[in-house]
DNA sequence: GTCAAGTTGTT
DNA sequence: ACAACTTGA
């Protein structure tokens, strides 16, 4: 395009899409030629540098974004290095007048971005950020006392009462571009893709990128959305939306998902649609909590548990849990699904988390760390909320006696044992009832699966009792 | 101050 | 029934 036109940097982060991208739109609306950039700076994430599965996804998503930009006559320029100096040298080299980006809400990144915005504005550069990730800003909703919400239901009631559907915005088919400034580095230089291709199995299940996100939404609407309220608890079926990694990387705007769901509303589907949108509400609530309680990725939301008697780190047990060798089939199925696909069904996440924190009584942060490194949808807000909720240390006024029984949970939500058979195939030869608790017939287990653990790491009844005792001490009246 | 309600449980 | 807490209006 014309080299005289004013340019602006559009700094892509966790908003790896073109449609419904407020930062891109702002640059275009202001008449700038947008220069799309991505800066790889994993050291700026505090204690939560992205994990390996997350990196593998990001590699492909960045690739897809570059292709989408190229199809519109633009391209993505990638850089490695500290964000602020990189932005500053790019501003000089491109003669750009402004930087636009969409906000992230992880505490370390929020802090970094505030500093960057101030520094840029001090030097006279227009620096503006937008909400591209959430239905509600984390600070938007408050109780009548002006406090942050600590319970989901009143939060979501307030959210729905103030909800206004944003119109969809489709990016123009052609984007202006310029050759001014450096080209950046090839995608491979970011070293996001695994050196060994352990992620090979992932991509049979996932297509990172905006088109993949849109396809996942359509697949959901045509399929699992119908009956979602019931079926979402069934790990043996495709009962969920599978949108979580797409939402995490910003490959689709949540408000576009809401609009697409609402467009399907009929009396018969209302319950399913409300249930699906409510799950997006949990994502909103998690960001609300992380914003107001930024210490919770590391520390208990409820300080009563700060001196709780967690198990000392006995590595072999933790490792057995991680590797799907706990001896509890539904737990092992979940952990192996995670390892092979980078994802785990939400119902099973609760079961494996309950087993780790209650039966094995490991501190929830061991589980949170493992999920962080292995999930393609690893998200600091969601991960923190989920683990603290299960552990009973979280925002919920948690009944400490909520201990999932992995056998009854499996019987209830995987009634034919098909999920177990799929991910723990050595148990497939057992009759269905034995798949839930194979230790009940040691001979059959030995014959079918000589290498599978004879017994669970911790006896279920004994583990439950021990956990209840430990938690009762915390939950009791002593701290009033 | 009162009072209703709280995602997902187990026996 | 558990055992009895916290949140939010």
Image (tube, coloured by chain):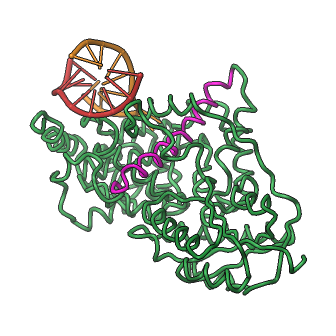
Chain colours: A green, B orange, C red
Residue A150 falls in image quadrant: top left
Residue in the image at 19% along x and 55% along y: A310
Prevailing secondary structure class for the magenta stretch in the rendered image: helix
Quadrant (top left, top right, bottom left, bottom right) of the C terminus of chain A:
top left
Q: Is residue A35 above or below residue A170?
A: below
Q: Is residue A394 left or right of residue A168?
A: left
In reply to whether residue A288 is colored magenta, the answer given is yes
In reply to whether residue A226 is colored magenta, the answer given is no
Residue A218 falls in image quadrant: top right
Q: Position of residue A347 (x, y in %)?
A: 46, 42
Residue A478 falls in image quadrant: top left
Query: In the image shown, does A342 or A297 lie closer to the viewer?
Result: A297
Query: In the image shown, does A38 or A62 lie closer to the viewer?
Result: A38
Q: Position of residue A59 (x, y in %)?
A: 63, 72
Q: Position of residue A369 (x, y in %)?
A: 38, 63
Quadrant (top left, top right, bottom left, bottom right) of the N terminus of chain A:
bottom right
Q: Position of residue A66 (x, y in %)?
A: 75, 72
Q: Is residue A366 above or below residue B6?
A: below
Number of disc labels: 0
Query: In the image shown, does A255 or A436 lie closer to the viewer?
Result: A255
Q: Is residue A334 above or below residue B6?
A: below
- The magenta span reads A268-296
């Amino acid at each position: 395009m014309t080299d005289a036109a004013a340019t602006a940097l559009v700094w892509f982060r966790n908003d790896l899409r073109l449609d419904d991208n407020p930062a891109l739109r702002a640059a275009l609306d202001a008449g700038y030629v947008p220069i799309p950039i991505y800066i790889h700076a994993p050291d700026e994430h505090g204690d939560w540098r992205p994990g390996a599965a997350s990196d593998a996804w990001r590699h492909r998503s960045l690739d897809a974004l570059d292709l989408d930009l190229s199809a519109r006559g633009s391209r993505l320029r990638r850089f490695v290095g500290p964000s602020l100096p990189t932005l500053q040298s790019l501003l000089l080299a491109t003669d750009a007048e402004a930087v636009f980006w969409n906000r992230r809400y992880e505490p370390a990144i929020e802090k970094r971005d505030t500093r960057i915005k101030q520094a840029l504005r001090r030097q006279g550069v227009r620096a503006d950020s937008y909400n591209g990730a959430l239905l509600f800003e984390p600070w938007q909703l408050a109780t009548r006392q002006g406090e942050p919400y600590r319970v989901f239901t009143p939060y979501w009631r307030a959210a729905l009462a103030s909800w206004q559907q944003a119109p969809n915005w489709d990016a123009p088919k052609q984007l202006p571009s310029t050759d001014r400034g450096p080209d950046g580095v090839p995608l491979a230089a970011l070293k996001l893709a695994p050196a060994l291709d352990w992620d090979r199995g992932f991509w049979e299940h996932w297509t990172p990128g905006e088109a993949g996100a849109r396809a996942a939404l359509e697949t959901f609407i045509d399929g699992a959305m119908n009956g979602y309220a019931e079926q979402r608890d069934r790990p043996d079926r495709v009962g969920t939306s599978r949108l979580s990694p797409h939402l995490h990387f910003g490959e689709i705007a949540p408000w576009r998902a809401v609009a697409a769901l609402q467009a399907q509303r009929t009396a018969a589907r209302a319950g399913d649609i409300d249930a699906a949108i409510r799950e997006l509400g949990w994502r909103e609530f998690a960001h609300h909590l992380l914003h107001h309680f930024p210490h919770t990725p590391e520390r208990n939301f409820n300080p009563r548990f700060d001196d709780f008697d967690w198990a000392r780190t006995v590595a072999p047990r933790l490792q057995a849990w991680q590797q799907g060798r706990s001896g509890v089939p539904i737990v092992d199925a979940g952990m192996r699904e995670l390892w092979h696909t980078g994802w785990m069904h939400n119902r099973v996440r609760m079961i494996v988390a309950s087993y780790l924190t209650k039966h094995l009584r490991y501190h929830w942060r061991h589980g949170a760390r493992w999920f962080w490194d292995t999930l393609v949808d690893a998200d600091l807000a969601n991960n923190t909320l989920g683990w603290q909720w299960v552990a009973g240390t979280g925002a919920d006024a948690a009944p400490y006696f909520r201990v999932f029984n992995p056998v009854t949970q499996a019987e209830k939500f995987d009634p034919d044992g098909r999920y177990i058979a799929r991910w723990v195939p050595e148990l497939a030869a057992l009759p269905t009832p034995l798949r839930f608790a194979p230790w009940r017939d040691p001979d059959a287990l030995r014959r079918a699966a000589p290498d599978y653990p004879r017994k669970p790491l911790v006896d279920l009844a004994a583990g439950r009792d021990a956990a209840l005792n430990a938690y009762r001490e915390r939950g009791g009246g002593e701290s009033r």
